[in-house]
Image: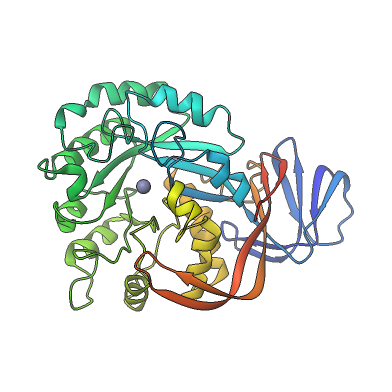
Amino acid sequence: MKAELLIVGGTIVDPSTGRSGAGDVLVSQGRIVGVVEPGTAVEAERTLDAAGCYVSPGFIDIHTHIYEGVQEMGVAPDRVGIDQGVTTVVDAGSSGFANYEDFVKRSIEPSKSRVLAWLNISAPGLAEGRSELADLAKLDPKATLEVIERHRDSIIGIKARMSGSVVKTSGIRPLEIAKDTAREAGLPVMVHVGNAPPALGDVLDLLEAGDVVTHAFHGKAGGILDADGSLIPQAAAALERGVLFDVGHGSSSFSFDTMIKAKELGIHPYSISTDLYLVNLVEGPVYSQAITMTKLLALGYTLEEVIAWATSAPAKVLGLETEIGTLKEGSEADITIFRIEEEPVLLKDAEGKTIAYNQQLIPQYTIRAGEIYSCST
Ligand SMILES: [Zn+2]
């Protein structure tokens, strides 16, 4: 067999195919050629030694803020992308139809990471403060649809942030507009949930299969669990319909208590995203998708589950499951090589609660379309 790049000696973990265990990965022309048994004779131009490491599909983070220089808290995509073992980073509503062309120039074109976006249903996105849905005059479905049509290659859905400080007196109306627009475009919505109003139940009732609730496991009042710790009926109904619950860690939206109670009820995240922006990247408690994944390991989820929720599951959210989030032959050669370091670590949620754990998931190399990048740790 022949390949441009051969990744040898690693342990494969690819939930999309169910393959796990020792294996070598062959890459040519930016694509996966195959995964073979260790020791298979391969003529390779370049070999990357992955001994002691895991080799998985490239991590995908569906909630980040990467409109650097315009959104106050935005960071450069590669800082939370290839630098951290993440091959695909999705901006969650930092721009809207009024500035999406600028987002393409600043954030997509210069980046080595694959950059996609949920387009904010409000014209300026988050470029003019954080109450972008308070004035309904800023929502224009026609203009939004025009921008989507021009950028089908990078816009994968519409973002609506449905919490009190964002919508003010607009109530549930911005989400109705976002849903109508998304339906017309044939795309999902990602809804940010937080403090009411609107009430979470009213938000969930508007969502359909494939729509994403980010910050689903926050620790604020009015979340998916009621005061007795039971799942609210609208959340149960939403899950039944195929609405997807995403982590969206952020500075104030990830609670170990909520996650533990939800886990006991059999409610697990569909995808692990970070809501990374400047402050929570530099000062925590988020830091990276890898650390967020480590927190899920600490809660007792298996490596297979955690990798699935950062690879094959988010690829499905994006409608790209045949291209990324997999090591299947013919797919894009987006690969993360990481190790599990056995060392004590104190993990902190967004409520100030800590959990002591004895392992850390540490990315070593990011391979994006066949190019190798070392991760900064
Ligand atoms: Zn966010």
Q: State the residue at coordinates (32%, 23%).
A: 98
- Position of residue 106 relative to residue 212, above or below, is above
**Is residue 11 rendered to the left or right of residue 62?**
right
Residue at the image point whose x is 20% and y is 42% from the top: 175
Q: Position of residue 372 (x, y in %)?
A: 73, 44
Is residue 319 at least partly visible in the picture? no
Colour approach in the figure? rainbow
Residue 40 image-quadrant placement: bottom right
Q: Position of residue 236 (x, y in %)?
A: 24, 65
Location of residue 112 (image quadrant): top right
Please state if 346 lies on the left or on the right of 83 as rendered: left
> Residue 148, image x and y in percent?
36, 26
Q: Left or right of 317: which side holds 289?
A: right
Image: 134 above or below 232: above
212 lies above or below 124: below
Say if residue 46 shows up in the picture.
yes
- Which residue is at a point 22% across and 40% down the rendered structure image? 131
- Residue 271 on image: x %, y %: 43, 57
